[in-house]
Image (cartoon, grey):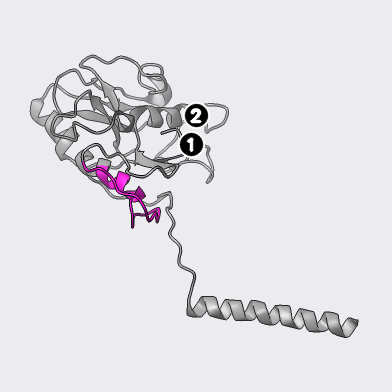
Amino acid sequence: MKKKIKTKKKLLVSMVGLFAIICMINPIKSNAALQANKNPGVRAKIGEWLPQIRKMEATGGTLGLTDDTINESTLTSTTKNDLDIHMQKNTEYGAMAILSASAYGNQNKINDGETTTGNKTGIYIKLNKELVSAGKIEYNTVFPKVNAKYKDSYDEQYVRKVGDAITETKGWHDSKNFEWINRNDTSTLLRAYSDSIFSYYGIGNNEAQSETYHTKAQFYTRACIVIGNDF
């Protein structure tokens, strides 16, 4: 009986060793998407970020799906795959910011490079003028037909959206809140502006500055992934 057990152990060890060798010779291929964490990241214009992030879900994209294409105009998916990845909206950034200051997060002021929980389980924050998908009801030249679920649309005068962390968080953690979008142009919104996760920058009085800051200049952003079948 002992001899049989010993033989089985040797066989098991041999099988494990063989599997390891096979994996070394022909490793199992996988596709994965990683959070940027402390990396400085890359920058792009809003007209580039919106489609690029959506295409992470498409065939051959970062998420490794094999049966999906993205409509170039609306950025909607042709396949129902219970997965949705898109550029962060203003309300999604706001939810992250508010949770960071709650009992579930880091209630101290978050400095550049720190996380929303105060440890590595949280979301790393770079105070670098972070772009969100939000602005005028029509983006004009910047993807005006993008499906409404991929942007937070505001009219000429700001009307609060639940969770957007604009009016309800003014002054939190020494935030500086600059002018809101109040003209009919192609502007959008920057968050994590001026040394605080709660700071924002809408639009200035200078036409050239607003055009540069919101449609031509390149900024950082985040991708949000929604898992489920209700979208």
Q: Which mark is residue 99?
A: 2
| Rendered view: 171 above or below 86 | above
Q: Is residue 197 visible?
A: no
Which residue occupies the foreground of this view, 35 or 112?
Answer: 35
Where residue 176 sits, quadrant-wise, is top left
Across and down, in percent, residue 90 comes to 34, 29
Q: Secondary structure at mark 2?
A: helix
Residue 97 lies, in percent from the top left, at 43, 30
- Residue at the image point whose x is 54% and y is 43% from the top: 119
Q: Residue at x 17, y 23 (%)?
A: 204
Chain-order first, disc 1 or disc 2: 2
Q: Residue at x 22, y 23 (%)?
A: 137
Q: Which mark is residue 133?
A: none
> What is the magenta segment's predominant secondary structure?
loop
Q: Is residue 60 magenta?
A: yes
Question: In the rendered view, would you say 162 is above or below 27?
Answer: above
Instruction: Assign a secondary structure to mark 1.
Output: loop
Instruction: Give the Cα distance between marks 1 and 2.
Output: 8 Å
Is 196 placed above or below 113 here?
Answer: above
Which of 46/209 is in front? 46
Q: Is residue 81 above or below residue 153?
A: below
The part of the chain drawn in magenta is 51-72
In this view, the residue farthest toward the left is 208
Q: Amino acid under label 1?
A: Thr
Q: Which residue is mark 1?
A: 116
Which of the image's four quarters has the C terminus? top left
Q: Amino acid at mark 2?
A: Leu
* Image position of 173 (left or right of 107): left
Pointer 1 with pointer 2, Cβ within 8 A: yes
